[in-house]
Amino acid sequence: MNDSQRQQSHQTGMITFARDLPNICSLVGLLCAVFSIYYAILGNFSFAIIGMIWAVLFDWGDGIIARRMKGRTDEYRAFGGQLDSLIDIVSFGICPAVFLLSYGEFNIWFLPGAFVIVATSAIRLSYFNIFGLIDDSTYMGLAIDNNVIILAFVFLFEGFFSQSMFSVLIYTMLMFMAIFNLAPIRTPKFGGKWVYALLVYVLGLTVIYI
């Protein structure tokens, strides 16, 4: 980028970048994550799960919209990438961490697990921002949005356990997933037509949890 392009970019207001359609989609996903954190703190875990899985859907949606938009400049793409990454750490790092803390009744023993979830998200996203995908359809390690997808399914079985037992179960599960998030293993990147499967999954779980 030359000096005139940099000057032009600086003259573009931050709100102008935020009005970009893929970035609006990202921000709606952030709103879902904020609702999830709010309901997790209140102890309404069904609504917290709903917020988290909708955050996943909008996270997938922003990338699909961005790839289909014509004439999107490098500056808008760069801004969108940074925004998406920062929102991901809230949606799939802080949000599940608060969920775990709240479900564990904010017992101090759940604090290390919450830290591991957030730290894993920060490490993984930093790595991804530098190195990206292995190829067009392969991640290194398990993508952190998958943690939420799996958690939402497992939580359907909450009623079969006492709260104390189930809190240990999801604590253990989230720690194992954190290992896979950072593991040097290849995992598929779901996209394209998979978004329709995710939409059905999200709508189905929303109805069930409501």
Image (cartoon, grey):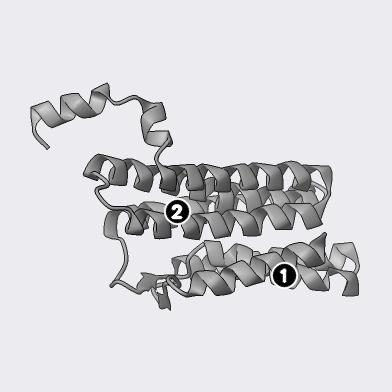
What residue appears at the point 37 percent right and 45 percent down from the top-left corner? 80
Residue 33 visible (yes or no) = yes
What residue appears at the point 30 percent right and 71 percent down from the top-left corner? 136
176 left or right of 156?
A: left
Crowding at dot 1, Cα within 10 Å, few <14 / some 14-19 / many 20+, comes out as few
Residue 172 visible (yes or no) = no
Q: Which of 95 and 172 is in front in this view?
A: 95
86 left or right of 1?
A: right
Q: Position of residue 44 (x, y in %)?
A: 83, 50
Q: Position of residue 47 (x, y in %)?
A: 77, 53
Q: Nearer the viewer, residue 158 or 2?
A: 2
158 left or right of 71?
A: right
Q: Position of residue 33 (x, y in %)?
A: 63, 47
Crowding at dot 2, Cα within 10 Å, few <14 / some 14-19 / many 20+, comes out as many
Q: Nearer the viewer, residue 124 or 109?
A: 124
Residue 62 has which mark? 2
Residue 204 has which mark? 1
Residue 1: quadrant of the picture: top left
Q: Is mark 2 on a helix, strand or loop?
A: helix
181 left or right of 71?
A: right
